[in-house]
Image (cartoon, rainbow, N blue to C red):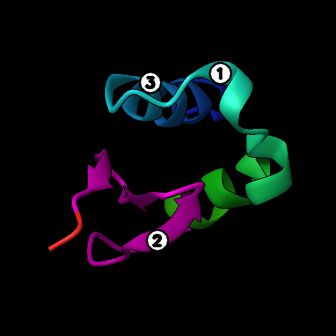
Amino acid sequence: MSDRQLLFEIVDALETEGLGRDEYQLQRVIDVEALEQLVDSANDDLEIRFSVGEFRVLVTQSDVRILTNP
């Protein structure tokens, strides 16, 4: 996955859930390049979770999802 593709997937997932581009500054939450390197170097079991505003983001080697609150 390239930096740009991962960044696009994260932004797309957030916007699909209704978070507008003007409601967050992703570069203040994560370092996309470092995240990409970590995801690419890890095994299939790696899950990275972080918050963007009220949303919880899950990143794996094959997927970016927004987790719903229970």
Q: Amino acid at mark 1?
A: Arg
Give the distance between the C-alpha atoms of the residues marked 2 and 1, in whole angstroms. Answer: 22 Å
Q: Are marks 3 and 1 in contact (CB under 8 Å)?
A: yes
Which residue occupies 79% across, 39% down? 25
Residue found 63% across the figure and 51% down from its top: 36
Name the secondary structure under disc 2: strand
Question: Which residue type does callout 2 highlight?
Answer: Ile
Is residue 26 left or right of 40 when viewed as pictured? right
Sequence-wise, which precedes: disc 3 or disc 1?
3
The residue where tag 3 is placed is 15
Q: Quadrant of residue 34?
A: bottom right
In the figure, residue 52 lies in which quadrant? bottom right
Element carrying mark 3 = helix
Residue at figure coordinates x 23%, y 67% from the top left: 69
Around disc 1, counting alpha carbons within 10 Å, would you say few (fewer than 14), some (14 to 19), or many (20 or more)? few
With respect to residue 11, does 43 lie above or below?
A: below
In this rendering, the label closer to the viewer, 2 or 1: 1
Characterize the local packing of mark 2: few (<14), some (14-19) or many (20 or more) Cα atoms within 10 angstroms: some
Residue at the (54%, 68%) spot, across then down? 50
**Residue stretch rendered in magenta on the structure:** 40-68
- Lower position in the chain sequence, tag 3 or tag 2: 3
Mark 3 and mark 2 residues within 8 Å of each other at the beta carbon: no
Contact between labelled residues 1 and 2, with CB atoms less than 8 Å apart: no
**Residue identified by numbered label 2:** 48
Using the image as rendered, state which of residue 70 and residue 1 is in the foreground. Answer: 70
Q: Is residue 30 visible?
A: no
- Of the two numbered discs 2 and 1 on the same chain, state the one appearing first in sequence: 1
11 relative position to 4: left or right: left
